[in-house]
């Protein structure tokens, strides 16, 4: 039999466990909704012809412009087989965000492909609920949405999400370089 002291302790533990599960479930749902919004923005970008607010092929110039325009200290990574083309201010589910536009080399006989790199502050998303990609020095999570790969990682207080049409070998190659 439980003493009267043990019963409240156990019910308190159960309440904490249920609360943690609910927070985790909400965070996973928030991550899913954010992935959907990122894919939709990428497709919108394609229909607008990849219009940028700032055009440059220099990662340093793009990072400086984004810092001045969005207040976010964005690192513009060098992606293998891709060239930065410019940037724009945007919003991710109502939050200010930075968007770096890349052009990825086409596969044999195919034209170049666009890629979108978003950077924004996390707001309730629980990225570890997504599958992770092996390799690399950081945790890289992956989702698929509307035929696109969405690779997500956190760095220096920001969430980064790369959205592009990527093959499995390209995903694995990027995982070791982001």
Image (cartoon, rainbow, N blue to C red):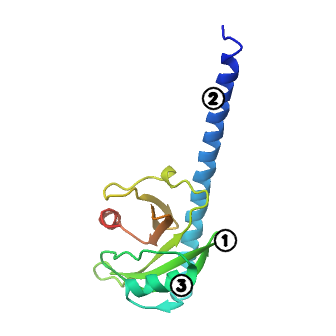
- Quarter of the image holding residue 34? bottom right
Farthest top residue in view: 1
What number is the disc on residue 94? 1
- From the viewer's side, name the closer residue of 146 and 96: 96
The quarter of the picture where the N terminus appears is top right
Q: Earlier in the sequence, mark 2 or mark 3?
A: 2
- Image quadrant occupied by the C terminus: bottom left
Q: Does 175 sit left or right of 147 as displayed?
A: left
Q: Position of residue 17 (x, y in %)?
A: 61, 34
Mark 1–mark 3 distance (CA, rounded to whole Å): 19 Å
Q: Tell me the element at label 2.
A: helix
Label 3: few (<14), some or many (≥20) within 10 Å? Answer: few
- Regarding residue 83, the answer to whether it shows in the image is yes
Q: Is residue 92 left or right of residue 144?
A: right
Disc 1 versus disc 2: distance between alpha carbons? 36 Å
Q: Residues within 10 Å of mark 1 (few under 14, many from 20)?
A: few
Q: Residue at x 42, y 87 (%)?
A: 61
The residue beneath circle 2 is 13
Image spot of residue 23 (x, y percent) = 63, 46
User: Does residue 171 appear left or right of residue 10 in this picture?
Assistant: left
Query: Which residue is located at x 48 percent, y 68 percent?
Result: 161
Q: Which dot marks residue 68?
A: 3
Secondary structure under the numbered disc 3 in the rendered image: helix
Splitting the image into 4 quarters, where does residue 110 fall? Answer: bottom left
Q: Is residue 65 above or below residue 38?
A: below
Say which of 129 and 169 sits in front: 129
């Amino acid at each position: 039999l439980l003493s009267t002291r043990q019963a409240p302790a156990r019910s308190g533990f159960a309440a904490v466990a249920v609360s943690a599960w609910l927070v985790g479930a909400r965070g996973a749902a928030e991550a899913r909704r954010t992935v959907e919004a990122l894919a939709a923005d990428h497709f919108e970008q394609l229909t607008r012809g990849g219009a940028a607010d700032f055009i440059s092929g220099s990662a340093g110039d793009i990072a400086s412009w984004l810092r001045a325009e969005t207040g976010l200290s964005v690192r513009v990574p060098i992606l293998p087989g891709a060239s930065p083309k410019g940037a724009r201010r945007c919003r991710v589910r109502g939050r200010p965000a930075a968007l770096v536009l890349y052009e990825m080399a086409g596969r044999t006989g195919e034209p170049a492909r666009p890629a979108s790199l978003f950077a924004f502050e996390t707001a309730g998303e629980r990225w570890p609920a997504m599958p992770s990609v092996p390799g690399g020095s950081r945790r890289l999570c992956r989702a698929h949405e509307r035929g696109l790969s969405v690779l997500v990682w956190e760095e220096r207080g920001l969430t980064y999400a790369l959205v592009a049409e990527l093959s499995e070998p390209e995903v694995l190659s990027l995982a070791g370089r982001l």
